[in-house]
Amino acid sequence: MIKKIFFILSLFAFNMNVNAMVVERSVIQTQSGQQYIFDTEVARTDQEQSTGLMFRTILPQHHGMLFIYPFPQLITMWMKNCFIPLDMMFIDATGRICHIVRHTIPNSTHHIYSNCMAKAVLEIGAGLTNAYNIHVGDRLIAPFIR
């Protein structure tokens, strides 16, 4: 019984941390000028970035998570404990999408690489980059880009 209570309390604490993350409006602008708006939770701290979208079972269509790093770098991600298939957009310091990985596999420990010097990663629901015709070279308009 004590273990069950502790488990429930730990899940509650986890959900409080997730909900405490800053939410910012992010806009993807395609090369044709089309814009798509996402409400993104911003993962800036090591803890937020290591947790990411783990243990979530839903991600609303116009929501996502934006991982911001202190400087451009080669980034490695994975899907361990992530139950939602995602599209990952790797974004350079100018806001340009430099690599896209579509339809990631939930719970996979396979490494996903940026293949470019990225300053951020935007994760959205799987299939949305195809549905919205988002490609490498399109831009992210977000407050972290100066």
Image (cartoon, rainbow, N blue to C red):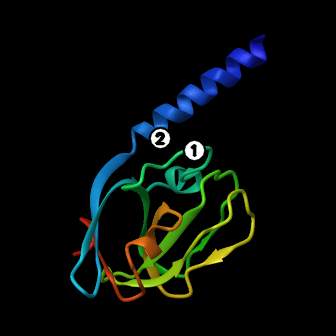
Q: Is residue 56 left or right of residue 136?
A: right
Secondary structure at badge 2 equals: helix
Q: What x and y, as percent, mark residue 133?
A: 39, 79
Residues under numbered marks 2 and 1 in contact, where contact means CB atoms less than 8 Å apart:
yes
Q: Quadrant of residue 25?
A: bottom left
- Above or below — where is 67 with respect to 35? above
Residue drawn at x 39%, y 45% is: 21
Q: Secondary structure at mark 1?
A: loop
The quadrant the N terminus occupies is top right
Q: Residue at x 27, y 87 (%)?
A: 31
Callout 2 amino acid = Val
Q: In the rendering, at what x and y percent does residue 73 appear? A: 50, 81
Q: Specify whether residue 121 is in view.
A: no
Q: Nearer the viewer, residue 66 or 45?
A: 66
Q: Which of the two residues, 52 or 103, is positioned nearer the viewer here?
A: 103
Please name which of the two marks, 2 or 1, marks the residue nearer to the observer: 1
Q: Residue at x 45, y 67 (%)?
A: 128
Q: Amino acid at mark 1?
A: Arg
As drawn, the label of residue 18 is 2
Q: Residue 100 appears at what percent x and percent y? A: 50, 80
Camera-side residue of 40 and 32: 32
Identity of the residue drawn at 34% across and 47% down: 22
* Residue 110 sits in quarter: bottom right
| Residue 56, numbered label | 1
Q: Classify the position of the C terminus by image quarter.
A: bottom left
